[in-house]
Image (cartoon, rainbow, N blue to C red):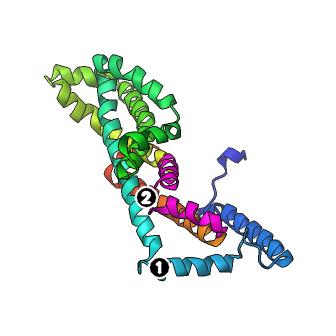
């Protein structure tokens, strides 16, 4: 039997999914043990037990100065910026994608501009955003919006243009206006794609957020990582990196669950 016809069972699939993580953990543990054996004061690769102890302290012990748990403050600040930027991007890309995909005049007006904007490195615009919007929350949210909106818009517009012409013609035959066609024909078909685009853009959104927080912020996950790096506090850095990964995974899982519940017909076609 060909390999492409071999489908792992549930236990085998779970084992295969866990295998890369187990290999990384084992490799890190071995490398950490080697370095700590040679130099017990080494900070580059702290022992897994040290990371666990640090994580427990960061999640539960308040800061001596502010009397607050800094990790939770950083989490709430970063999530507010991330969700704000992603929400605005989703709304903009949905509106622009529908307009470009359905309206020839809008396509002529925006498609070239969006294509050029998608080629601009968003991080290169960060100093400009700080000058224009200041060092507060707005510049960080705007960076996320500029970073992920062009990609999402182009993909949604392409999906709208792929809608069979027969559906558009039938809707017009029944007397539907352009607005009704957008809401009743195009919108239901691209909403699942919008959720998929948001999921794919989350990695980039986190990158832009952490970069902005590292440059100019006094709270946030990215700010804290770059603050403690001067002390070579790798146990704190790794805890924050793992926590960011967990948050990203949870958000992605929630979006995937939303897509499955709201658009079961889409999942059935995959």
Where residue 192 appears, x then y in whole percent? 37, 43
Number of labels in the image equals 2
User: Few, some or many C-alpha atoms within 10 Å of disc 2 (few <14, some 14-19, many ≥20)?
Assistant: some
Q: Residue at x 46, y 73 (%)?
A: 70
Of pointers 2 and 1, the one earlier in the residue sequence: 1
Q: What number is the disc on residue 251?
A: 2
Where residue 197 appears, x then y in whole percent? 43, 42
Question: What secondary structure is found at the residue carrying circle 1?
Answer: loop
Is residue 87 positioned above or below 174 on the image? below
Q: What is the distance, in whole Å, between disc 2 and disc 1 at their CAs?
A: 28 Å
Answer with left or right where residue 34 lies relative to residue 76. Answer: right
Is residue 113 positioned above or below 8 on the image? above
Task: Give whichever of 128, 73 is nearer the camera.
Answer: 128
Residue lying at the far right in this picture: please name it: 38
Task: Give whichever of 187, 263 is nearer the camera.
Answer: 187
Q: What number is the disc on residue 261?
A: none
Answer with left or right where residue 185 lies relative to residue 266. Answer: left
Q: Residue at x 70, y 68 (%)?
A: 25
* Quadrant housing residue 181: top left
134 within the magenta span: no
Q: Residue at x 42, y 33 (%)?
A: 150
Q: Which residues are magenta?
A: 204-233
Is residue 138 positioned above or below 220 on the image? above
Task: Give whichever of 11, 94 is nearer the camera.
Answer: 94
Nearer the viewer's eye, disc 2 or disc 1?
1
Pointer 1: what residue? 63
Q: Main secondary structure of the magenta part?
A: helix
């Amino acid at each position: 039997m060909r390999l492409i016809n071999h489908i792992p069972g549930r236990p085998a699939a779970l084992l295969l999914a866990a295998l890369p993580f187990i290999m990384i953990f084992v490799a890190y543990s071995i490398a950490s043990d080697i370095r700590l054996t040679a130099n017990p004061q080494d900070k580059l690769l702290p022992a897994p037990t040290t990371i666990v102890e640090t994580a427990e302290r960061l999640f539960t012990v308040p800061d001596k100065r502010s009397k607050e748990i800094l990790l939770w403050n950083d989490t709430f600040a970063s999530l507010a910026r991330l969700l704000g930027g992603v929400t605005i991007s989703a709304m903009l890309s949905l509106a622009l994608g529908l307009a470009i995909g359905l309206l020839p005049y809008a396509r002529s007006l925006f498609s070239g501009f969006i294509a050029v904007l998608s080629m601009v490195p968003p991080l290169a615009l960060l100093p400009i955003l700080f000058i224009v919007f200041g060092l507060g929350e707005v510049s960080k949210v705007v960076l996320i919006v500029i970073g992920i909106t062009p990609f999402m818009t182009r993909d949604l517009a392409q999906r709208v243009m792929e809608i069979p012409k027969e559906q558009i013609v039938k809707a017009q035959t029944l007397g539907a206006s352009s607005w009704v066609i957008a809401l009743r024909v195009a919108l239901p078909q691209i909403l699942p794609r919008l959720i998929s685009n948001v999921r794919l853009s989350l990695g980039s959104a986190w990158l832009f957020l952490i970069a902005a927080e590292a440059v100019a912020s006094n709270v946030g996950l990215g700010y804290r990582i770059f603050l403690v790096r001067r002390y070579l506090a790798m146990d704190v850095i790794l805890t924050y990196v793992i926590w960011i990964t967990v948050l990203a995974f949870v958000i992605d899982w929630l979006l995937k669950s939303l897509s499955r519940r709201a658009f079961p017909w889409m999942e059935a076609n995959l």
